């Protein structure tokens, strides 16, 4: 058995680990980093282009980020926070493009308007109110609103083609939205990291155990799945960014902060069209309202996608029930994640979310005809033969104890870190990849607190992310300054 010593061990070859590796190498080029990925390629699970919506979640079109309360009020706080976080991500990508660390923007990001579309008087009233609240804030000042069928037809011709003229429709539009191929982006970042000194990529390697040494370092047992060779990596800091695989690995660490966490896995599928005459008629991401009982990640949308340079249209997601935590995982993932510390919260969530479980099971048994019928809400002229079903990635929603000690299901991302800052894991799903840079800055601030407070790292962070340490939500002038640069550099005008 071989052994090695590193400053940082990154577990999981997705966008989170790649982003953290890039940030750390920009802050301290001498830092020794190893990235371990159990598959034979990076970015092949949730980060892969076909396994997520590629929306570049900014809160522009995702209606679930602005929930409506029973009294009719709309809360926009989460949309503001997500938008500001995505602006942070764009700033870091802009820096990497300017330094030619990342390739030309069209290889991973393309301008794609973000639009919301609803029908019926009730939903139109909701969208009108939502627009009024959001557009009053400088982050969303450029959002347009329309109830004119003719204007909306110009925005989204495929959606309006042959639609019932008597139907009430409403839409919003932000022109500087983006489609992001997170798989290509991540592979480009890892390719750059491989060219740097003191960085090692270990593909087809599985982590079997993580144990804390008396010195405060982590002894991580890793196996080469191809050769069977076992080795130990001694790391001062471990980051677990393995998507659905993060929870089982976090449980192996036995840190107090991990107690009570569980996972609720949800699978997904897309309808995909690559027919050129259809694809060329739709250039936007159009989001609607989720069906009653659907999880927030199941908000239906008709998207322009450019993955590995190939244009296509995608509709979905169609959620499904699964017991796997990863697309290439085991059907026993859910059962094996049940521990004494999380049994009560998981049972409570199971008991309190039977409607959701029934919904997911029903979704799994839909026919192709049923799925295309749902698509016709967004594309009235859709025909079954033009669309094929494709599996999307797995999402493991967070189960945790609430203030009363009961279980609750959360649809977001959450950072779990050891109190001494020696280990951190990212759990959850959407908005995920779009807020990767802000999420990894949070890791740095919690786990590299002293170094982040140093003048050297503070200055360097402001070079990487000019708005660092300031609020884009509160500072309109700062937003204008950074947004002009990112839109210009990333060709998103």
Image: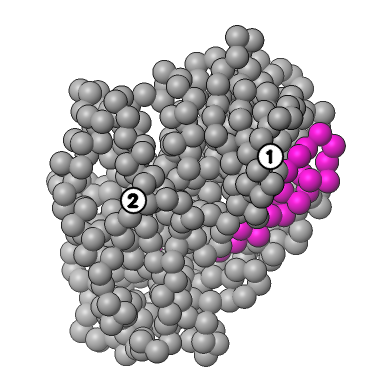
User: Mark 2 Cα within 10 Å, few/some/many (few <14, many 20+)?
Assistant: some
Residue 135 in sight here = no
Name the spot of residue 40 as percent of width and height, x first.
65, 54
Mark closest to the chain's N terminus, 1 or 2: 1
Above or below 177: residue 430: above
- Dividing the image into 4 quarters, which one contains the C terminus? bottom right
Residue 269: where, in percent of width, then height?
39, 66
Discs 1/2, front: 1
Residue 175 highlighted magenta (yes or no): yes
| Residue at 75% over, 35% down | 25
258, 490: nearer the viewer: 258
Give the SS element for disc 1.
loop
What secondary structure is marked by label 2? loop
Coloration mode: one colour
Mark 1 burial class by Cα count in 10 Å: few <14, some 14-19, many 20+: few
The x, y position of residue 487, in whole percent, is: 64, 57
- Judging by the rendered image, the residue that carries numbered circle 1 is 229
Q: Residue at x 62, y 66 (%)?
A: 110
In front: 339, or 111?
A: 339
The residue under label 2 is 323
Q: Position of residue 86 (x, y in %)?
A: 54, 47
The vertical placement of 343 against 166, above or below, is above
Q: CA distance from mark 1 to mark 2?
A: 30 Å
Q: Which residues are magenta?
A: 172-201
Q: Is residue 162 left or right of residue 423?
A: left
For residue 130, which quarter of the picture? bottom left
Q: Residue at x 53, y 54 (%)?
A: 45
Q: From the image, which quarter does the N terminus lie in?
A: top right
């Amino acid at each position: 058995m071989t052994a090695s010593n590193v400053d940082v061990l990154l577990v999981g070859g997705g966008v989170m680990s790649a982003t953290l590796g890039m940030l750390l190498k920009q802050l301290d080029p001498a830092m020794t980093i190893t990235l371990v990925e159990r598959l034979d390629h990076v970015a092949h699970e949730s980060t892969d282009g076909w396994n997520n919506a590629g929306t570049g979640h900014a809160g522009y079109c995702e209606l679930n980020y602005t929930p409506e309360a029973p009294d009719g009020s709309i809360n926009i706080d989460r949309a503001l926070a997500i938008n500001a976080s995505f602006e942070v991500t764009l700033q870091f990508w802009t820096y990497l493009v300017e330094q030619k660390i990342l390739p030309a923007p069209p290889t991973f990001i393309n301008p794609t308007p973000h639009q919301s579309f609803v029908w019926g008087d009730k939903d139109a009233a909701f969208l009108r109110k939502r627009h009024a609240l959001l557009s009053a804030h400088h982050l969303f000042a450029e959002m347009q609103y329309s109830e004119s069928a003719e204007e909306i037809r110009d925005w989204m011709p495929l959606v309006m083609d042959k639609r019932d003229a008597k139907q009430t429709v409403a839409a919003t539009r932000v022109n500087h939205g983006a489609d992001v191929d997170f798989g290509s982006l991540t592979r480009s970042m890892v390719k750059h990291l491989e060219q740097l000194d003191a960085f090692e990529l270990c593909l087809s390697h599985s982590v079997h155990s993580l144990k804390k040494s008396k010195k405060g370092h982590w002894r991580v047992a890793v196996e080469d799945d191809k050769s069977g060779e076992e080795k130990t990596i001694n790391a001062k800091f471990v980051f677990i960014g393995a998507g659905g695989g993060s929870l089982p690995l976090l449980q192996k660490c036995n840190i107090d902060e991990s107690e009570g966490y569980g996972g609720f896995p949800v699978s997904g599928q897309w309808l995909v069209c690559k027919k050129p005459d259809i694809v060329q008629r739709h250039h936007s991401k159009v989001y609607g309202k989720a069906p009653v009982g659907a999880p927030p990640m199941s908000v239906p949308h008709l998207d322009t996608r450019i993955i590995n340079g190939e244009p296509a249209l995608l509709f979905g997601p169609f959620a499904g029930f699964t017991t796997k935590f990863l697309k290439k995982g085991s059907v026993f993932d859910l059962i094996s994640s049940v521990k004494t510390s999380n049994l009560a919260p998981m049972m409570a969530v199971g008991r309190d979310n039977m409607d959701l479980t029934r919904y997911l099971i029903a979704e799994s048994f839909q026919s192709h005809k049923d799925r295309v019928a749902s698509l016709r809400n967004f594309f009235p002229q859709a025909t079954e033969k033009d669309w094929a079903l494709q599996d999307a990635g797995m999402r493991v929603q967070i189960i945790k104890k609430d203030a009363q000690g009961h279980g609750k299901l959360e649809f977001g991302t959450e950072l779990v870190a050891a109190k001494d800052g020696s280990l951190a894991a990212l759990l959850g799903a959407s908005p995920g990849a779009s807020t990767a840079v802000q999420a990894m800055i949070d890791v740095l601030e919690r786990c590299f607190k002293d170094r982040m407070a140093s003048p050297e790292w503070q200055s360097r962070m402001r070079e990487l992310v000019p708005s660092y340490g300031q609020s884009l939500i509160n500072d309109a002038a700062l937003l204008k300054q950074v947004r002009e640069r990112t839109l210009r550099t990333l060709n998103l005008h």
